[in-house]
Image (cartoon, rainbow, N blue to C red):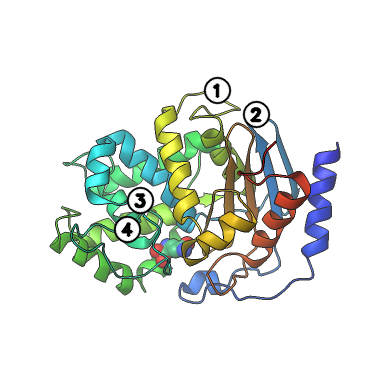
Amino acid sequence: NPIPDYLREVLDALRDDTSGERAGYIPELAEAHPDYFALAVTTAMGSTYTAGDAGIEFTIQSISKPFAYAAAIMDRGLDQVLERIGVEPSGEAFNELSLEAGTNRPKNPMINAGAIAAHGLLVGADATGEQRVDRALELFSALAGRQLRIDESVFASELGTADHNLSMAHMLRKHGIIADDPHEVVAGYTRQCSILVTVADLSAMAATLANGGVQPCTHERIMDEATARQVMSVMAVAGMYDGAGDWLTRVGIPAKSGVAGGLVGVLPDQVGIGAFSPRLDSHGNSQRSRRAFERLSTDMGMHLLAPS
Ligand code: GLN
């Protein structure tokens, strides 16, 4: 098959790039094997192709954000979510502390403040912390098409150094954006970030968005089309943090990165793409994954805004 051969060729061309650093602020991630490199593509028709270290599981981290946002919309309705979380680019780093002037909303659900708020909205107003985590795990498993699990040691490692996220959660409660105990919401959000995935899980999750909310391998409808569109739009606007504009103009694939080195991208009606390599560039995006997406975009004409 030409597709896995091509994916392997992309990996081989970029393998020498050992620039960047593993995420240092989460002790367990700083210890991760730095040389892993994997790619997966799932088509909207349900075929998956992988190359490289595709069997390796890593924590989903911030790639959980668009999918938890989808769950918040399904559980609370878009209006309630928009009241608490904006859809504007932040132009700043993933952990910026600022809220939108006037509304006190986090600017979007891709920065930590917005993602913590989205996690706090899961299930319903009376939900327990455990129910919110179960909701995220159940939805991500349905999107991936297999039962996923949480890496408890990465979770514990990150929660031990979560002062920054805790301070944001306190600020969110002060402004009425979250209602529950900030410690409980941050613990739940951190568990959500510690769900283990492979690149093929990521490409399947993204392919579900590309397919308008129907998982292309199990054929299960997981969200309605409007929700999938909302999520892809926010990924295009803010998925790559302060590098979002540069990314959209050059690569043109709505995407979301995570500090464990994962990167997910989606092309409506066509494919979901997953990549993994632990070393991060100065924006906190996986260096080799980013370059692999650049290659795919150029070689395969995948820019969203290019006429077909
Ligand atoms: N769990 C990480 C955090 O909240 C996720 C950040 C990321 O992947 N960019 O800091």
Considering only vertical position in the picture, is 178 above or below 146? below
Which type of secondary structure does the marked residue at label 3 adopt? loop
Please give the residue where the numbered disc 2 appears in the rendered image: 46
Mark closer to the chain start, 1 or 3: 3
Residue at point 57%, 55% (across, down)? 248
Mark 4: few/some/many CA within 10 Å (<14, 14-19, 20+): many
Q: CA distance from mark 3 to mark 4?
A: 6 Å
Label 4 belongs to which residue?
107
Local packing at callout 2 (Cα closer than 10 Å; few below 14, some 14-19, many 20+) is some
Front residue (pair 34, 44):
44
Q: In the rendered view, would you say 61 is above or below 134?
A: below
- Left or right, residue 171 beside residue 188: left
Sequence order check, earlier mark of 3 and 4: 3
Give the structural element (helix, strand or loop) at label 1.
Answer: loop
Q: Please identify, in this view, whether the residue under mark 1 or under mark 3 is nearer the observer.
A: 3
Identify residue for label 3. Answer: 87
Q: Are marks 3 and 4 in contact (CB under 8 Å)?
A: no
